[in-house]
Amino acid sequence: MLLKYFYDDKIAHASYMVGCQATGEALVVDPARDIEPYLQAAEENGMKIVAATETHIHADFLSGSRELAERTGAKLYLSDEGDENWKYEFAPQYNHQLVKDGDTFKIGNIKIEVMHTPGHTPEHISFLVTDTAGANQPIGIFSGDFVFVGDVGRPDLLEEAAGIKGTAEPGARRMFHSLKRFKALPDHIQVWPAHGAGSACGKALGAIPSSTVGYEKLFNWAMAYEDEDQFVKALLSGQPEAPFYFAMMKKLNKVERNVLKELPQPAKLNVDQLAQVLDQGAVVVDTRSADEFAAAHIPGTINIPLDKSFTNWAGWLLGYDQTFYLIGSEAIIRQAVRDLVYVGLDNIGGYFEPAVLSAWPGKLQSYQTTTPTEIADQVLKGEVTVLDIRALSEWNEGHLPGAKHIMLGYLPKRAAEIPTDKPVVVHCRTQNRSAIGVSVLQAKGIPNVIKMHAGYQGWATANLPIERNGK
């Protein structure tokens, strides 16, 4: 048996290729939309990808199952659990098999047993893996978004992201009963989840890529609850905000969408075209570092640096119904495109190299930065408007006196709520999110914006006053 692990740290997504070395056949589990890494790994290991499967209809990325089906002829094994709202509408277009709890299929000598594990979503399934060439018991379980290292899948995404009211609590109760089945599995079984630390599909995911059933039973917080009501309350509290794009991912992963034959190659545009698209109200994303953007940028552009958070914030801040543009070097744009199509943001109108800044006919824009100690006196005297763009759970743990809270992802839609009669000081926990926030406000026409370097963490470290629970 061959097991290969693939990980994208931008959205903390893990996928897998499991193969039978005797027959050279392989299955890909929860594939990403860019399937080149799987094709390359298969070739390097003398494997042919004959099948692909998904643990559920994903909300945080576009699955590559259809890409694998079209490129390799892979058979798709898809969940037939859940009600009529949780069926794969695209399935009839491909060679596929719908599977339910207890069903099995084989990839060479590798037996895959389906286990219905609802809670995160109604149709969620996990896969127990047995190498029948040398064993008669499972070696591991592909747990998808059911059980993570140190956490379990959140059940509120259907309500928070997809707007399906009244689904969070029933989902949590289904999760409680799914975990009873998990805890009945042998301790030696390895756990291979679909996400790691940083994913918004849970609230306390560990950074270790895999675990065992026995270890999770000992140390996963969710396994400690024997009372269902207490478990439900604990699971639903403190979950992070669900990115806007999650609702679109659910739709695109279930119904028709563009299937990539290769990654898009946006055209390089010139400075005159940049002025034109900005005049038309298009969103232009500058992918340079926060420091470079702060020093000089073209008015009207927003800054989402191409770092580990790029995909997440692009999903929050960019729309699926409007063409947008990028600023960055050719190499940076190639990576940005891969990250964007990962979440279905294919509507890239083109890109501009950073040299457009020196060719820009108008005045470039910049913004000021400050530190907690430098700005503290003005904050405490109410001479500035303090905007906290952290998550609600962070805000509830403590915040600056008199601060206004708007989580970064909601900022474009709520910028009009911010008073502009004073300088606006923007902060997050440290500084990464505040750099994006300042750029959004400037692009919305708020000129006097200051980024507070070191953020709430720096404020607290300096022992400056903090409000908690309104006090």
Image (cartoon, grey):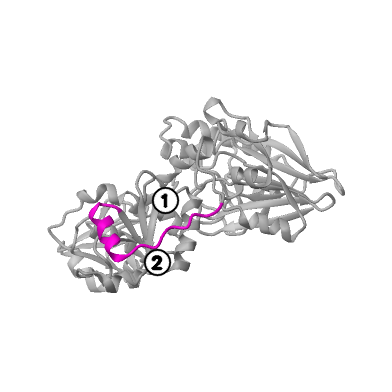
Q: Amino acid at mark 1?
A: Gly
**Residue annotated with mark 2:** 328
Q: In the image, residue 45 lies at what x, y percent? A: 76, 59
State how far apart marks 2 and 1 are (Cα): 18 Å
Relative vertical location of residue 432 with respect to residue 280 in this rendering, above or below: below
Query: In which image quadrant can residue 461 be found?
Result: bottom left
Q: In the image, residue 195 lies at what x, y percent? A: 57, 51
Residue 56 appears in the picture as rendered: yes
Say which of 226 and 352 sits in front. 352
The residue tagged with tag 2: helix, strand or loop? loop
Relative vertical location of residue 448 with respect to residue 212 in this rendering, above or below: below
| Residue at the extreme top | 84
Q: Is residue 412 on the magenta stretch? A: no
The answer to whether marks 2 and 1 mark residues whose Cβ atoms lie closer than 8 Å is no
Q: State which mark lies toward you, 2 or 1.
A: 2
Q: Amino acid at mark 2?
A: Gly
Query: In which image quadrant can residue 313 be found?
Result: bottom left
- Residue 109, labelled with which disc? none
Q: Is residue 368 left or right of residue 268?
A: left
Magenta residues (range): 262-282
Q: In the image, residue 149 lies at what x, y percent? A: 61, 52
**Residue annotated with mark 1:** 315
Q: Is residue 186 left or right of residue 301?
A: right
